[in-house]
Image (cartoon, rainbow, N blue to C red):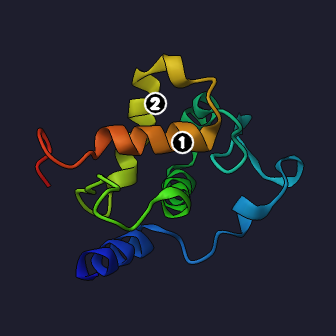
């Protein structure tokens, strides 16, 4: 239970105070500099592209996906290295073009589980 509480605290630190933009329909969500916002991205490729324009929304979206999908149990096998865990997700998605067409939330979660699997080589 202590580990789950510490994990939840870590995630809260990485999330913004509000996530109202995430609840907007795609047609009303902001478009940044001609590119999709991380909040409006429908595919993993669009999400990674949107992260180049808006890193803070990117990190918030990664945190939201993690909170929505994680199971707080010893079987979740995700060991985050710190509060900046979201920073590596867009780079992982860009390095794996085979997932670019995948739904954004699925691609984000796949990146998290691939990057931060407990045990070797991370050993968290």
Characterize the local packing of mark 1: few (<14), some (14-19) or many (20 or more) Cα atoms within 10 angstroms: many
In the rendered view, tell whether residue 103 sits above or below residue 37. above
Q: Quadrant of the N terminus?
A: bottom left
Taking the view exactly as shown, the residue that stands out farthest to the right is 27
Characterize the local packing of mark 2: few (<14), some (14-19) or many (20 or more) Cα atoms within 10 angstroms: many
Q: Residue at x 50, y 18 (%)?
A: 97
The answer to whether residue 51 is seen in the rendering is yes
- Which of the two residues, 32 or 36, is positioned nearer the viewer here? 36
| Rendering coords of residue 46 (x, y %) | 64, 32
| Left or right of 88 in this view: 41 | right
In the rendered view, tell whether residue 96 sits above or below residue 34. above
Residue on which disc 1 sits? 51
Q: Residue at x 45, y 59 (%)?
A: 70
For the residues labelled 1 and 2, say whether their Cβ atoms are less than 8 Å apart. no
Q: Viewer-nearest of labels 1 and 2?
A: 2
| Rendering coords of residue 120 (x, y %) | 11, 40
- Which of the two residues, 75 or 38, is positioned nearer the viewer here? 75
Q: Residue at x 11, y 49 (%)?
A: 123
Q: Quadrant of the C terminus?
A: bottom left
As helix, strand or loop, the secondary structure at mark 2 comes to helix
As helix, strand or loop, the secondary structure at mark 1 comes to helix
Cα distance between the residues tagged 1 and 2: 11 Å
Compare marks 1 and 2 and give the one earlier in the sequence: 1
Residue 36's mark? none
State which quadrant residue 65 falls in. bottom right
In the rendered view, tell whether residue 58 sits above or below residue 104. below
Residue on which disc 2 sits? 93
Q: Residue at x 62, y 75 (%)?
A: 18
| Left or right of 99 in this view: 88 | left
């Amino acid at each position: 239970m202590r580990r789950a509480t510490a994990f939840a605290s870590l995630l809260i630190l990485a999330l913004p105070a509000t996530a109202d933009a995430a609840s907007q329909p795609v047609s009303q969500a902001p478009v940044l500099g001609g590119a999709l916002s991380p909040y409006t991205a429908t595919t993993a490729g669009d999400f990674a592209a949107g992260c180049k324009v808006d890193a803070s929304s990117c990190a918030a979206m990664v945190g939201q996906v993690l909170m929505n999908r994680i199971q707080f149990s010893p079987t979740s096998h995700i060991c985050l290295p710190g509060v900046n865990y979201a920073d590596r997700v867009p780079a992982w998605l860009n390095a794996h073009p085979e997932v670019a067409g995948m739904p954004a939330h699925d691609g984000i979660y796949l990146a998290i589980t691939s990057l931060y699997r407990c045990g070797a080589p991370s050993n968290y």
